[in-house]
Image (tube, rainbow, N blue to C red):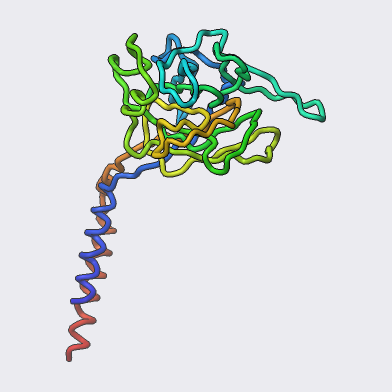
Amino acid sequence: MKFSKLIIVALLVSAFSAYATDSSLNEATYSLINDGISQTVNPDASNGKSVIVNGEAIYIGVTGWSDTGGAGNDLVVQGTNSSALKKWNATWSNGVVTSGYGIQNDDNGDSHAIDNYNDFDMILLAFSEEVTLTDASFNWLKGDNGNKEITVAGLDLDSSSPFLSNDSFTWSDAASHAVEGAIGHFGIANTAENYYFNSTFSNLSSAKYWLVGAYNTYFADSNKIENNIKLKLSGIGFTTETDATTPPPAPTPVSEPGALALMSIGLGLLAYRRKRRV
């Protein structure tokens, strides 16, 4: 009896496994330097740069944004023009040249970087499907306040939302469109690895639109102003999730000799059990 129950349980487990859904993460890296950028908030095959992930193209648009006042004033956010979001080079002491993107706006003393000096600068990364950001690299970094050097925020936007409509908005308005679980503030390694400074993100949910920039207090619980971070973005890492349902296996035909063999085994087991009872 125990043997029969064991067979039934094994069959049930096998049947359940055949219909199970597998979920896998596909990792990818988007290099703003090598893959190029397309300045759009609606990327697609006609106007976006793409990264191939699991055999499919994910289109990406990159735009720069900055508010119009000091770091303590949440004034109107404006998109930067094409000449303001641009690539800047950094030359290391041994002559190695690296590149990263920064933002130049009209504020006095602007450093051509994504910074929170007198204002908050952020880059909006628009993806053609939902992704989860995992890390970022920077070819230039200045300033260190511990573990709040970079703000990452995933947004849920539509045609009437900030960045996509023509309406004026503030960073507070943008923060109100944040996806639950998609806001994080992270540190950046102050020692370069292969000439780039790296930041690793964790515990973020997925979104199609992502803001990446110097620590922005309007996406944080604290109103404390941190205005000593300047950086230039070179690349971003992300994952996409693929769900695949495994179909049940096709029935395997049993040949006549195979059927006879199974019958013989069954009769043998039955005879064995009767012999033990005697």
In front here: 267 or 193? Answer: 193
Residue at 51% across, 8% down: 81
Q: Please tell me whether residue 102 is drawn above or below residue 203 in the rendered image.
A: above
Q: Please tell me whether residue 8 is drawn above or below residue 225 in the rendered image.
A: below
In front here: 137 or 162? Answer: 162
Residue at 62% across, 23% down: 100
Query: Where, by quadrant of the figure, is residue 57 drawn?
Result: top left
Residue at 22% across, 59% down: 12
Q: Please tell me whether residue 176 is drawn above or below residue 145 in the rendered image.
A: above
In front here: 177 or 210? Answer: 177
In front here: 209 or 141? Answer: 141
Query: Where, by quadrant of the figure, is residue 250 drawn?
Result: top left
Placement of the N terminus among the 4 image quadrants: bottom left
Left or right for 93, reference 6: right
What count of labels does the image hold? 0
Placement of the C terminus among the 4 image quadrants: bottom left
Q: Residue furthest bottom?
A: 278
Q: Please tell me whether residue 108 is drawn above or below residue 55 in the rendered image.
A: above
Where residue 92 appears, as percent x and y from the top left, is 77, 28
Where residue 26 appears, as percent x and y from the top left, is 45, 36
Where residue 225 appears, as percent x and y from the top left, is 49, 33
Where residue 157 appears, as percent x and y from the top left, is 32, 22
